[in-house]
Image (cartoon, grey):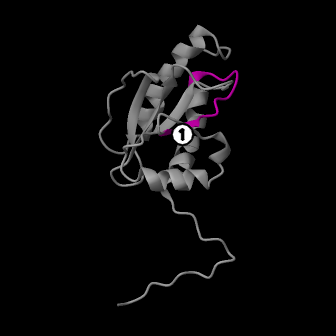
Amino acid sequence: MRRCVAGSSARDNDLVLVADWLTWHLSREAVMPMQASKDFEKYRYVASRLQGAWYAVGVRKSPPGASQTRLWLRYHQQTPGFDGIATNLKASTFAPHLTNEGGHLWVPLHVPAEADGQQIATALLPQVHSIDDAATTAHAEPASRPPSLPLDH
């Protein structure tokens, strides 16, 4: 893949290739097809760590505001466990970057500037894993509260 400047059409084409490579390597189950939608130029669903839940990673057509990236991860509002995913992400380090559009949760992916496609894809793998880990792992109760104990009935 080429090394190109953010915002160029060559860079946008590379981002589609990056999304394809990235989601292929993230897939734990069957690899879903790349597709397009009203929100994404191209995306693919990937199985989350949370049983039955999925997230999409792809190139957004119109990122919100002054977003520095077109690569985003989205949890659809109808994915199983969405309420818990939303709660977890809002309590995570990703909270300041979350957007809620159409009832879905969107997280921008940090794309290294002036990097080639393979460097970008390699940098994004741990980033996406961190987002899904934060989304699917219940956060510990605050230290000021005593731990709740399971009760046998």
Residue 110 in which image quadrant: top right
The local secondary structure at tag 1 comes to helix
Coordinates of residue 116 in the picture (x, y in percent): 62, 21
The answer to whether residue 1 is visible is no
Q: Residue furthest front?
A: 102
Residue matched to label 1? 125
101 vs 14, nearest the viewer: 101
Residue at 29% across / 39% down in the picture?
30
Which residue type does callout 1 highlight? Leu
* Quadrant location, the N terminus: top right
Q: How many residues crowd around disc 1 within 10 Å: few (fewer than 14), some, or many (20 or more)? A: some
1 over 48 or under it: above or below: above
Residue at 62% across / 82% down in the picture?
146
3 over 142 or under it: above or below: above
71 vs 40, nearest the viewer: 40
Residue at 44% across / 34% down in the picture?
23
Residue 75 in which image quadrant: top left
118 over 142 or under it: above or below: above
Residue at 32% across / 44% down in the picture?
29
Taking 129 as reference, is 81 left or right?
left
* Quadrant location, the C terminus: bottom left
Residue 14 in which image quadrant: top right
Coordinates of residue 145 in the picture (x, y in percent): 64, 78
Taking 23 as reference, is 146 left or right?
right
- Residue 101 magenta-highlighted: no
The answer to whether residue 85 is visible is yes
Q: Residue furthest bottom?
A: 153
- Residue 108 magenta-highlighted: yes
Q: Residue furthest top?
A: 9
Q: Which residues are magenta?
A: 104-117
